[in-house]
Amino acid sequence: MNFARCSRTAFVVSFVVFGLASASESGTASMIHERIARLESAWTPGSGEEETSYYQGATKIANDLSSIDEGDANREGLALLRSVLAKSSANKEFREADIAVGSSDLESIQSLTRFLLNHDAVPAALQSDKAVTLAAVLGVIRGEVKPNYVEKRVYENVMPPVGEGILIAGMDPDSIADPAAREKYKIAIRENERINLENRRQSMLQILEREFATPVVAYLVRIVARGGDDPEKVRAAISRARLTPQELRQILNP
């Protein structure tokens, strides 16, 4: 087998399917649009590896949005961010796939939101949609973040439950003969992985809230004051942003 050829083929496939692109592919709005379409068609829910590839592709596209017209970039970025928010594991029941996904969905949200906040040449018809989407970002972050979260202890290797035979931390659960002890050990390993994931996500969520709370609220203040193209839609979305009373007064009574 020609491994060099296979590796190159896999490299090209990942670029095409998951939104990655060469410099020549990132230069026009139509190319960005096509990359997003390919990314969406490749979405495979339930597979941690495939979900991670989707979020990594979304992050790469976010980093390339600055290569196109700012109005088009806002349009494509908003559409992709809404899709990422809908797919994100934030505020959802824990799944085994989440271990592999880690915080890659949050990294996509960060990259796309950062771009949209830093590039404000949005067409008038998209102002309300942008305000609604940014409000949703803040709501997602605040829905999962745990104020004053204290990182929990995790283990590099989990110790199996007390039982017969040689027991070593990190050993293969299937090498434990007793079915009850084996299952108990598997549960302990999964719980350790879940806690590790929670630690990572809470750390990332705190970073996102510190980065985005003030600029998102400022954007909402500006759009509400301006009236926008659909003020009622914006006001309805504000309730989903999990705003503090002070932020709400700031937006509605500037």
Image (cartoon, rainbow, N blue to C red):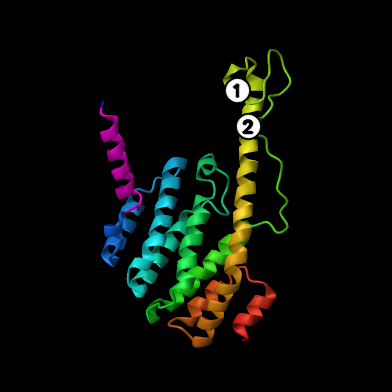
Q: Position of residue 40 (x, y in %)?
A: 35, 53
55 is higher (above) or lower (below) than 78? above
> Mark 1–mark 2 contact, CB under 8 Å?
yes
The magenta span reads: 2-21
Residue 170 is situated, as x and y percent measured from the top left of the image, at: 63, 26
Viewer-proximal residue, 83 or 14?
14
- Residue 108: x and y in percent read 47, 57
Question: Which residue is drawn at the image coordinates 33% and 51% (left, top)?
Answer: 41
Query: Which quadrant does the N terminus fall into?
Result: top left
- Residue 224 vs 155, above or below: the answer is below
Amino acid on which disc 1 is placed: Pro
Crowding near the residue tagged with mark 1, few <14, some 14–19, many ≥20 C-alpha atoms within 10 Å: some
- Cα distance, mark 1 to mark 2? 9 Å
Q: Earlier in the sequence, mark 1 or mark 2?
A: 1
Residue type (three-letter) at the residue carrying disc 2: Ile
Q: Nearer the viewer, residue 155 or 179?
A: 155
The circle on residue 189 is 2
Q: How many marks?
A: 2
- As drawn, the label of residue 173 is 1
